[in-house]
Amino acid sequence: MNFDFSDDQKMLRDQARKFLNEKSSTKTVRTVLNDDAKSFDADLWKAVAAQGWLGVTIPEEHGGLGLGRLELCVLAEEIGRAIAPIPFSSTLYFFTEALLSAGSAEQQAKVLPGVVDGSVIGAFAVSEGPGAPSPTSIEAQFDGSKLTGVKIPVTDGDIATHAVVLAREGAGLSLVLVDLNQAAVKRETLQTLDPTRGHARLTFTKATAERIGKAGEGWDLAEGVLDRAAVLIAFEQIGGSQACLDMSVEYAKGRYAFSRQIGSFQAIKHKLADMYVGIELARSNAYYGAWALSTESSQLPIAAAAARIAASDAYYFAAKENIQAHGGMGYTWEVDCHLFYRRSKLLAVQAGGPGVWKEKLVRRLELKNAA
Amino acid sequence: MDFNDSSEEAAFRAEARAWLEKTLGPPASRATMKTEGDVIKASKAYQAKKAAAGYVGLTWRKDVGGRELPPIFQVIFSQEEQKFQAPVSPFGIGLGMCIPTVIAFHSADKIKRYVGPALRGEEIWCQLFSEPSAGSDVAGLKTKAVRDGDDWIVNGQKVWTSGAHYCDYGILLVRTNPEKEKHKGLTMFVVNMKAPGVEVRPIHQMSGGSNFNEVYFTDVRISDSERLGEVGNGWNVALVTLMNERLAVGGSAGPEYGEILELARNTPSPSGKGSLLQDQAFREKLAGWYVSAEGYTLGKYRTMTALSKGQTPGPENSIGKLLNANRMQDLANAAIEGEDHFGIISDPAVAPLQGAFHNAYMWAPGLRIAGGTDEILRNIIAERVLGLPQDVRVDKGVAYKDLPTGR
């Protein structure tokens, strides 16, 4: 029984933290935030590729490192802590996971080497409008070779080179792979809560596309990708939550009111203790999710849902109370609290909102209990 | 990362399970224990067999009767014991907190005297720290011990002592020097609960039950040879006891998400359409309880992994009771409200799960206070885990006798 990351994985974490402290300080994040024309940091993306991180789960035959999902979890936590302005989650947790689980050998060989070197940026496009997507709500159409429809919002859709899209094919749904650099794809950049990541509306008008996986299995494949992404995003959420707690603790020690450190007041202590409890609850659930993901366990659907719910709750609480602990300063543009408040909301809805995941969890528990 | 047993652990689990099967049989096969006397008798009988088979003190030193196994083996054994509903409750405090303190601070011949009988369940122990005016602020306790030759004379009152009425010995924290600051004038002793001058009175709890006691000390004589640690060092001895408490405290003692899920499956929903389990508001709460319960269990495994690597249990383990007690209260409340009018019925013959949700509802307020209130646990997390500064203290540098007391 061993519920911890290995020494090698912890070493990778330390290296990643050091690297991101240097290359992705909040100053770097702000260069993207403050520039409307910029939706990611291209230099950081190249540097991350040079570190080998983009190939961490990709087999060696495609140029990757062929390590496991646990290594990706470790990196995700650091990416989340640094609120790195790069399309890491879209490309690795969604796009690459979709290709690795459903793509043919040919499709993998075509795209994955580009992921490893950073030249391919991947997106995953499901949503078409307000509310949770369902098997009956998807309207985008795939006719076997061409894709027509609208996807909104697509995270990193403004900069992605490729996308995996959920579309209707005949009576069922399928996942299709699309090269976004074609005239039949129109991109419109969207203004969002978190400008440190790009978002777009993608309009496909008979765009050339190819199916990945079997026809009619798109919904189940997408659900599988979401389960995998949920675990990985949970680690990003935990990294971000921990950064909020660290900020709050530091501020509460240094800020004086009524001639005492504000951290000596129980109103502040209990708030920060609750942040800690939420983060540890999320961490324990995420570790279990990481184990289930890395071992392809049948427990993954339940573990992923629990990890996602706990991490979304923890990050929301940590991000909002971090602002509160900072008082008026926390509400200014210059103090970093809002960067986390923004990112926490993106991550909470990016793979489906908490309501959807609570419903998924209970449905899965009902089945398990009935069995 | 591996959530499965290692081959060594799996072998131990199988061996433990076989022994439990042979010794206890399935829970359903056992006679229902009606009185507390029955429970104590059955517990002592079980404990004797458990000690003979070498399943007590798994992590303790060999020279005191332990096996020096990594803590994970204790977890495995406890998990299996729980499945068989083994009668172990009277020994939790003694073996989990008192005896480890005795082993850490008592003399060699006293360790020999006390550890064996405790291991075999022949003697039961309790812990005497809290007082009517010293709860969260336990170092403010009043009970005093005055030196008299080779003995100490103890006068005062303890409260919230679990099992005092059936215990043989206790560890007792008293004030030996009121001239010093409050944390520095304390000393710890082993006290014979049957000694003249010790009087135990049960507390009538709001739940109707009586799990705790008041213990009065009137001119109780304790030999200096029963002192644990140095005179005036009682606070540090108590911290060792409390550190062990973190390992000993278990999970929620109430119904969990599985039980309420089944209840909801067979209860109509508030909307009148379908079952309570199909009610969206209920489903959201159910998801939350699952995440909390699983997070607690998995967090405990993380702690055990750290322990197996030689780390000591830290204050981060204060999370468990905070989560469990509050979840127990909310879950019980939702079960009762979910039953609508019918929810008021606690009669075991009529209420679901023989009234387990009602018992939890009435037990939870106590659990949120016992062993560190929610508020104290948050303070511990804030100060000892996050490193936030202590609150402004009006008792620093002041002799105990000069402190304001109020009522």
Image (tube, helix red, strand yellow):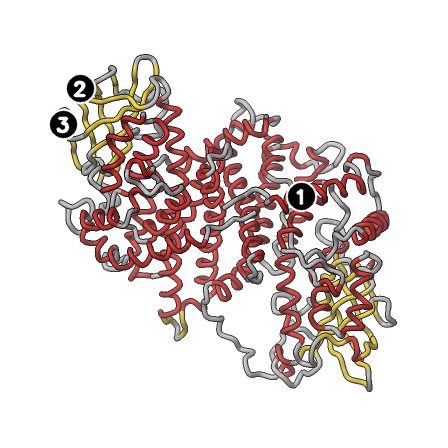
Which residue type does callout 2 highlight?
Lys
Which residue type does callout 3 highlight?
Gln
Give the x, y percent position of residue B55.
74, 52
* Whether label 1 touches label 3, CB < 8 Å: no
Q: Quadrant of residue A165?
A: top left
Q: Chain of mark 2?
A: A
Distance in Å between CA atoms under marks 3 and 2: 10 Å
Residue at image mark 2: A206
Q: Does B344 sit left or right of A355 as displayed?
A: right
Assign a secondary structure to mark 3.
loop
Residue at image mark 3: A182
Mark whose residue sits in front, 1 or 3: 1
Give the x, y percent position of residue A278.
46, 50
Give the x, y percent position of residue A19.
29, 56
* Residue found at x 54% / y 56%: B306
Q: Tell me if mark 3 has few (under 14), some (14-19) or many (20+) residues whose alpha carbon lies within 10 angstroms of its own.
A: few
Which residue type does callout 1 highlight?
Ala
Give the x, y percent position of residue B268.
58, 26
Residue at image mark 1: B11
Q: Is residue B306 above or below residue B222?
A: above
Mark whose residue sits in front, 3 or 2: 3
Assign a secondary structure to mark 1.
helix
Q: Tell me if mark 2 has few (under 14), some (14-19) or many (20+) residues whose alpha carbon lies within 10 angstroms of its own.
A: some
Q: Does A194 sit left or right of B200 as displayed?
A: left
- Mark 3 or mark 2: which comes first in sequence? 3
Distance in Å between CA atoms under marks 1 and 3: 61 Å
